[in-house]
Image (tube, grey):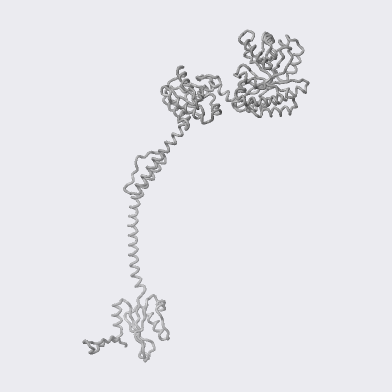
Amino acid sequence: MPYQMVLMPVRAPGLIGWVGMGFMLNDQLARELGALTRLSVSFLVDEPGRNDTRPTFVVGALQPASVSVLNAFRDALMQGRFIDHSDMEEMTDTLARAMQLQGDDSGRTWVIIQHDRGDLLAVYHALSWQLLCIFAVMLMLTAIVAAVIARSMTRPLLRLVTSARRIGRGERLSALAHGRHREIGLLADTLMGMQADIDQREQSLLYQARHDRLTGLSNRDSAQQDIADTLEQGMPFTLLRLSIVGFRQINDTFGYTVGDEVLRMLAQRLEKLSLPCQRTYRLSGDEFLLMLPGEGIAPQGIITLHEHLSRPVEHEHSPIALTLIVGEVSYPEHGESAGLLLRCAEIAMDRARHGHIRHVRYEMGQDEQHQRRLALARDLGTAVEQDQLIMVYQPKIVAASGEIMGFEALMRWRHPSFGFVPPDEFIALAEQSGRMTQLTQWMLRTVCRQIDLWAQQGVSLCVAVNLSAHDVMDTTLPERIHLLLQDYQLGPERLRLEVTESALIQDPALAQGNLIALRNAGLHIAVDDYGTGYSSLSQLKRLPVQELKIDKSFILKLDHDSEDRIIVRSTIELAHSLGLSVVAEGVETEASRILLMTLGCDVLQGYLISRPLPSDQVNDWITQYREGDSTTRSARG
């Protein structure tokens, strides 16, 4: 049996002896060590002199797993090999450590310490459940604390989100509750500042949307809203719609900067009017609107209005004269909606413009006339395509001999709904709607084709056509006429041009240039409706014209109106002194014909000779006219 010996020197202070102690490495010692270490302690003794060649174990209380490890270790020793710790741990679920205490010729002794893995892990398992519980409790506490903190943070944030949405919907907030959080308070202050900026921007946009940028007056949208609000109150009121006559000419002559200054000056004058409780608006362009309480405005008020607004505007020490027209409507007499009242005011103003009247009050039925004008302007585009236009021809004769001098081509329009439309009406609409070039081109082509057709029938005639003011200002007109004459192989003497006096005074320089080009091309040019315009003698002298046509308004009463006779006599003498021939249109009585011959008129035209004829009746009329005497001709006319 092995022993453990311990020798300790005894000093006093020198070495005086030795103390020796011995412990038997037996089962009891193993148990005591196991009790102290809580491990399974085993001693293994290998005595070579024994009969049994197997090493002897001196063990304490061993578990079955420990015995298996010891037996495996002993078997390995007998086989002369060594098992390390990992080999022993693989044999069983036991942690084991072996250490040789003694080894010599007398034998070898090992101490083997073992502990079951399950016992070691049992402590860990016990601790793991405790740790898991502690973790769960801490997690719950953390969640509760986080929820409390988040609730304290998110509740103000949610209130701010709701407030931001309300601000986005346009609601006005007086304050935002944000609690005691500094950062949230900063965000709330930022939202309130944003609301103030949005309010300011909306006010600016609203002002710009409802006011005119140039004059600062309220605009059309504001006018419609104010009229609608006043209509809801049921209080009578009057609208005056104003426009500047010839404002385009101001822009063309002085420039748009001066035109804008004129509009600003007029807006200031409108705001300073002494009319009671008026509200002023700029509708568009040169159109303004006054809104007055009560039904209608006194005549003296209109006079005061024109006197105050029509004062000349000074520009570089040169006055710019202003002429205003006014259209008047009242509620409830003329309508019960903002759109209807504004339209009626526009109709009244339009009638004032075309009638050259300063003020027109709307009357019932004028809307139908306005709608007729709109329909005619719209249908002018299709009148040519649908063959609604026709040309008729009125003869002109030489006053002295009665010989047929030529014909004047007159355009007629038979509308499918309105019937016969007077030329004065649809020609003016064509000029306003920009369709005059289309009508003139159709007229010139139709007349040239008809002249060529008559020539093929053996009748050689010259025909005069009327040119509008738009045509005279069209620089392409000479080239277009030249191409038409080439297309139908007509000489320029076969086509004559008649230009109204008003067309010549709009732009004398441009008109003169175009007429000179036409005259150089060999065309005969006459001034139509002479006496109704304002052309001067010097201007008439410069124009390349060969003929004057006295307006029929001076001819119709010639035989019994002395003033008309004086005008006609003076015109004939003036024209002859300038080397021009004279045509009198509107000759309807024999007395007028004889008087015109006496005064020296060159050419006569009117119902006394013949009414305007369709093209297919011209040849028959010529034959009948030439076969009869002068009395018969007059009767048949």
- Which quarter of the image is occupied by the C terminus? top right
Image location of residue 123, percent across then percent down: 33, 70
Within the image, what quadrant is residue 550 found in?
top right
Q: Is residue 452 left or right of residue 185?
A: right
Q: Is residue 114 left or right of residue 289?
A: left
Residue 219 at x, y = what percent? 47, 30
Q: Position of residue 593 (x, y in %)?
A: 68, 10
Image quarter of residue 599:
top right
Q: Is residue 282 above or below residue 393?
A: below
Counting from the top left corner in percent of width and height, residue 601 is at 68, 13
Q: Residue at x 36, y 79 (%)?
A: 97
Point 61% across, 21% down: residue: 502
In this view of the protein, which residue sits in the foreground, 540 or 486?
A: 540
Nearest to the observer: residue 277 or residue 498: 498
Quarter of the N terminus within the rendering: bottom left
Most foreground residue, 523 or 5: 523
In this picture, residue 525 sits left or right of residue 149: right
Q: Quadrant of residue 106?
A: bottom left
